Image: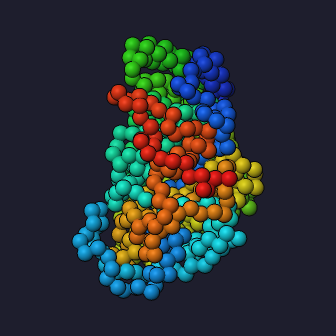
Amino acid sequence: MPTRRDWLTHLGGGLGSVVLADWLRAQEPPVAAPSGSASGQAGLHFPAKVQRVIQLFMNGGASPMDTFDYKPELARLHGQALGPKEKPEGFTAPAGAVMKSPFEFQQHGQCGQWVSSVFPHQAGIVDDLAFLMAMSSKTNVHGPASYMMNTGFILPGFPCLGAWISYALGDERQELPRFVVLPDPRGLPYNQKGNFSAAFLPARHQGTVVDVGRPAPIPDLFPEPGFEFARDEADLQTAQLLRQFNRRHADTRPEDTRLEARLAAAELAGRMQLTAPAAFQLAEETPQTHADYGLDRPETEDFGRRCLLARRLIERGTRFVQVWSGPQGAKDNWDNHGSIPKELPPIATSVDKPIAGLIRDLKQRGLLADTLVIWTTEFGRTPFAQASEGRDHNKGTFVTWLAGAGIRAGTSFGRSDDLAYETAEGQTFCYDLHATILHLLGIDHERLTFRSAGIDRRLTDVHGHVIHEILA
C-alpha cells in the first residue's frame, strides 16, 4: 500500500500527462451551457455575490440546546415529565423528563450570540456568522431528513444542492471537479452516496467523493507501479483510442447521460494529473496555518485537514465543497442517544477549531468576499432525556449558520420555543435555505428547473423563500 508521500510524488505525473491534458482540451468542442445557464458568469438571473460554497454538514443531528440555542427554562424545569405521552414517529424511545444542558453558555461578540462551552473557538467568530435559529425538518428519521437537507425531498431520487449548482453555473475552471465531497474517513453518512447524487440531472453533475483518509484519495488517476509502460506516449494513444470507442458508443445512446459523464470524467482525470498534486499538497501551507486548522493535534487533525483542503479546492476553481463530520451509525457522530455529556464534547472538539480556522483563513485571504460557508445538520434533538442523559431525534427545531459573501454578519433570524422543542417564530425549512443559497449565487430558485417525467422539477419543489433577514 503506497504512503501518502508516495501518492503525492506519483501525482507529479510526466510529460505524457501534459500532452494528454492539452490534447483532450483541444479535441473537445465547447460544451453548450444548460438552458438558462450563465456558465459561471455574473449569475444565472442576476449578478451573483457568491462564486463558490463550502458546506459543513454535522451528520447525525447536532443538539441545538447544547451548542447554540441557550434555553434557561430547561434548567428550571429539569426533571419534570413534560414530554409527549406517546412516542412520536421517528423517536427511538419514549420521551423522558426535561433535561437541562450539561454545558455552560455565555454570550460572545458584539452580537451577543449565546454559545455553549463545547464550541470555544466558534464562539470567537460569531460576529462573522448569521444564525438561523428556527430551522425545521419534516421527519425525525436520519435518512429522509438527510435527503431533505441535501436534495429538498425526503425520498431518494432527487438531485442534491451541489449537483444543481454544478448544472446551473458550469465550470469556473476546468482543472478540478465542480462539486467535491470530503466524507468522514470513518464512513459515509446516512444514505451513503445518495446525498451527493445528480439523480435525473446529467450524471456529470454528481459529487466527486474524495476520501483523504485513503493512501490514494482519488483512485485510478495514474497507472499502478507495476505498469510503467502505460505512460507518456502509450498513455496518450490509449486515451485517443478509448475516446473513439466511447464516443461512438455514446453517440448511439444520446439519452444516457452516464456515458457523457464517463467521457467527461476521463477528460477531467487527464487534467487532474497536473492540478491534483498542487491542490492536495498541504505541506505547502505554513506551520501556523496547520496549527490554525488544528492539524497539529490528533483530535482535530482529520476535520482540519479536510477544511484546509476545501479552501485549497475553492481557490482552484471547485464551485461546491461539502465537508462531512461523522459517519452513519451509532457512534463517532452527532447522534447522541446515549449520553450528551460524554458523546457531544469529542465530536464538537473535532470540528470546532478547524471551523474557526477556516473562517479566519478565508477572511484573511480575501476569499470570504465571494465565498459562502454553511454549517448545518439534518435535524435537532429533544429537550427530553433519552434513558438518563441522551437526547432523541427532533424535527421541530435546529440551528444553521452562514458566513461570507452577501451575509449580514452578526445577525440571527427566528426563535425556538422555551424548550427548543418546536419553532416559535421565523420558521425556516431546507427550501428557504436552498433558495437563499441560490439567490446569493445569482439564481432565482423558481426559475432553475429541469424537466423530468413530464414535470419541471426544482431544488425547492413548490416551496421556498429567500431569507432576506440575514442578507447584507
Q: How is the image coloured?
A: rainbow
Relative placement, left or right, of 365 versus 452 is right
Left or right relative to 247: residue 176: right
Residue 397, x across and y down, in percent: 44, 64
Indicate left or right for 282 with 202 as reference. Answer: right
Location of residue 129 with respect to 78 vertically, above or below: above
Quarter of the image where one finds residue 463: top left
Q: Position of residue 441 (x, y in %)?
A: 61, 41
Residue found at x 60% / y 33% = 44
Between 431 and 283, the residue placed more toward the observer is 431
Q: Position of residue 146 (x, y in %)?
A: 40, 53
Residue at x-position 51% and y-position 34% = 447
Instruction: Confirm whether residue 383 shows in the render.
Output: yes
Residue at the image position 46 percent from the left and 67 percent from the top: 424
* Along the viewing direction, whichever of 2 and 48 lies nearer the viewer: 48
Q: Give the x, y percent position of residue 202.
A: 45, 29
Taking 273 as reference, is 465 above or below it?
A: below
- Up/down of 401 relative to 382, above or below: above
> Is there any visible trace of residue 332 in the rendered image?
no
Q: Number of numbered discs present? A: 0
366 or 97: nearer the viewer = 97
Question: Which of the two residues, 150 or 204, is positioned nearer the viewer here?
Answer: 150
Which residue shows up at 40% across the image and 57% down it?
137
Residue at the front extreme, as displayed = 425
In which quarter of the view is residue 138 placed? bottom left
